Every structure is written in structure tokens, then in C-alpha cells.
Amino acid sequence: MPQGLRIGYIVPQFPGQTHIFFWREIKALEAMGHEVHVFSTRKPPAKLISHDWAGEAMARTTYLGRVNPIFALSAVAKLTPKGLPKWLLTEPRAFSKDVLISLAAADRLHAAAKRLNLDHIHAHSAARAAFIAALTHHMGGPRYSLTLHGPLSDYGPGQRFKWRDASFATVITQKLMDEVHEQLAGDLPDRLLIRPMGVDTTNLKRAKPYQPPEHGRPIRIFSCARLNVVKGHQDLMSATRQLIDQGVDVRVEIAGEDDHGGTGYRTQLEDHLKKLRLQDHVKLLGAISNVEVKAKLEQAHLFVLASWHEPLGVAYMEAMSMGVPTVGTDAGGVSELIADGSTGYLVEPKNPGQLARTIRSLAGDPDALLRLSSAGRAHIEANFRAELGAEVLVEEINRLRG
């Protein structure tokens, strides 16, 4: 039996409200017999730390800290002689700024990698975490890899530098893979794999069989995503207003918080909710734990997330794993997860009218809801288990060592 690996695992601002996927993958790697040493840039805001596993996660995470000019200057000497001048001369000014911000953290990671004798470092981001992993490698640290979770434009400057010396990379959708090849051709690692994130299907399963809404009773809709305009919560509210005006009794709960801990986009959603007179029908729950999310999914008749753009969507996976009929938008890579009319339904983003019509149609078709419940669960079990990502990571690291 191969010896267990020692893996460095970097996640930005861990553990945030959307980070349960990373925790599942860490646990899957450990169940396979590997050591996982978790690193992060810094802790998330306190109001965004909601999961029941967050305390354990923070206790075992090494936080690499903010920029420190003195440490950054001392770290420059550890870079390979061929590197820094060329990077600074050929990349945009924003790249140089990110180098200076990341150098001290890379120095700390380099020291930790040497102390822990890490075999490999994986950055679950193409932003600063990937910068830190790449700089650590140039200081003489372990080989590294990265995962792209969204459009390259979301992850800052220096993408060619981050990808150029990676041993391999995973990308969560074919749509993003096409973008990577188009924008970074000539600076990509030899091994690029499509590997979506996944969910713990063993834990995320129903305690009781799914039941469609009863005639004359409210339709319970659950949504879960951070509060940001691109998540389309305002469109779900508008669709809810239309349904109520048409005589359809709908109760909506939205879990998630904005990136400022409740003082940001949440205030605009609250104003929208009041304007639509939905206080009795829509509730903003804030950031809730994974245990509470599971309980809400168990109670829901429908899961709805009306994103304007979604690279893939762990929230959809969780709902489908729980056998909750799911409505998403045909935006980003969602169509690579949800087959419209088969494993869920897709509507146009920014179209509350179509969303309302889809919800109304499904609410009146219990057979369709039962079919979606079963098909969605089967699809996630077959293709989006958390263990699959862990298995790919181990296979690729062992291939490098082989």
C-alpha cells in the first residue's frame, strides 16, 4: 500500500460561509490515510463563521498573515535568482503589488513546508493563495497545483505566473477550461483536468422521503448563497411577489450573509423586501451552519437559486443530494450540473417572470417534483461526491512522485 502523502492545502479566508466543500475534501483525504496541513491567508469576518465544524477548522489552520514589508524584503533573497527581476519587468504593476503582498506569507509557508516535510501544496484558488504557492515553490519549496473555481477575471493579476510552474491544475467546468486555454495558452501545466467540487452524499441524504406540497398549504422554498447582487435573491423576491399576486401561497427562506457581515448588500435586499411588502413571506436567515442548512433542505418543497452568474454551484449540489427539486439559472456552468427538465429546471437569469411561472408549474405537478427529487439525488451520487476531488488530487500527486 502506498505511503500516505503530506499535503499542504491553502484556502483563502478559511473557514468562510461557503467553504464546507473544502472541509469535506480535507476529511476525505484524511479518510484515505493522508496528512492534510491547512493554511489560509487570514480568518474571515466573525459574522461569516457559522458552521459547526468552524472551531475545529480554525484550530488546525495556520494563518499566513497580512503584508509585512520587512518580512517581504527578507523573503526576496530566498527566491531563485532567475525569477523576480523578470516577473517585475514583464508583468503589470498590479502584479508587482501582489508579489510584495504575498512574499511574507510565502516565506512562512516555505518554512512550514520544510518543517512538515510536505510532499505537495494545493491552492484552492487562482487568486492570492495561488500566488503564495507559486512563490513558495520559487523559494525552493514543494511542487504545487491549483484549482480554478470561477472566471479568471475574478482572480487578479499574474495568472500566467501562477499557472506556468504548477505541476497540474483542476478546473471545475468545461466552460472554464475553454477560457483557460484561450487566455493562458503557452503558460499552462501539462496536466489540466476537469474536476468539479462535490458534496458529502453520505451525510446529505433525507431522513424521510420527499413529499410534494399539500393542496391548500404554503409552498416552502429554500435558497442558500451569500448575499450579493449576482446571486439573484432580489429576482426570487420579485418572483415571490408575482406568485402571491396570482394566489399562490409561497414562503421563502434565504440563508447567507453579505461579505461585510450584514452591513453591505443585505441592506438593499431588506429595502427590496419591504418595497414588495414581503415581510410575511420572505425571511433572510443570515449565515447559518451546515446542520441548519440540512434541516432547511429537509423541510423544503423546492430549492431555488436565481444567480446571474454561477461557475457551477455547490448549493445546487447540496439541495439535489438531499432530494429537493431544484430550480437554477442557465448561467455560467450551471447547465453542466443541472440537465433542464431532467435533474432540475433552468430559467433565464434576471427573469423573475419566467422563474415565477416555473415555480407555479412545478408546485402544481407532484409527479414532476417526485421525479426531480429522485433524479437529482442519483445524479449527485454518481458524479459529484466529495471523495472524487480528493481521489483526483491524490492520483495526480502520486503520478508526480511516481
Image (spheres, rainbow, N blue to C red):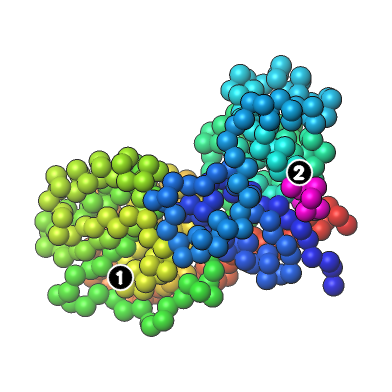
Quadrant of the drawing holding the N terminus: bottom right
Disc 1 secondary structure class: loop
Determine the CA span between mark 2 and mark 1.
Answer: 51 Å
Report the residue that reaches farthest toward the right. 402
Residue beneath the point at 67% across and 62% down: 390
Q: Can residue 329 be seen in this snapshot?
A: no
Residue beneath the point at 71% across and 52% down: 8
Per the image, is 48 magenta?
no
Quadrant of the drawing holding the C terminus: bottom right
The numbered dot on residue 301 is: 1
Question: 287 left or right of 351?
Answer: right
The segment highlighted magenta reads 111-120
> Residue 331 location in percent, x, y?
43, 46
> Residue 61 location in percent, x, y?
61, 54
Is mark 2 in CB contact (under 8 Å) with mark 1?
Answer: no
Query: The disc labelled 2 sits on which kind of residue?
Result: Ala
- The first of marks 2 and 1 along the sequence is 2
Q: Quadrant of residue 180?
A: top right
The numbered dot on residue 350 is: none
Mark 1 is surrounded, within 10 Å at the Cα level, by few (under 14), some (14 to 19) or many (20 or more) other residues, namely many
Q: Quadrant of residue 275?
A: top left
Q: Is residue 18 above or below residue 319?
A: above
Q: Is residue 158 above or below residue 39?
A: above
The numbered dot on residue 111 is: 2
Per the image, is 119 magenta?
yes
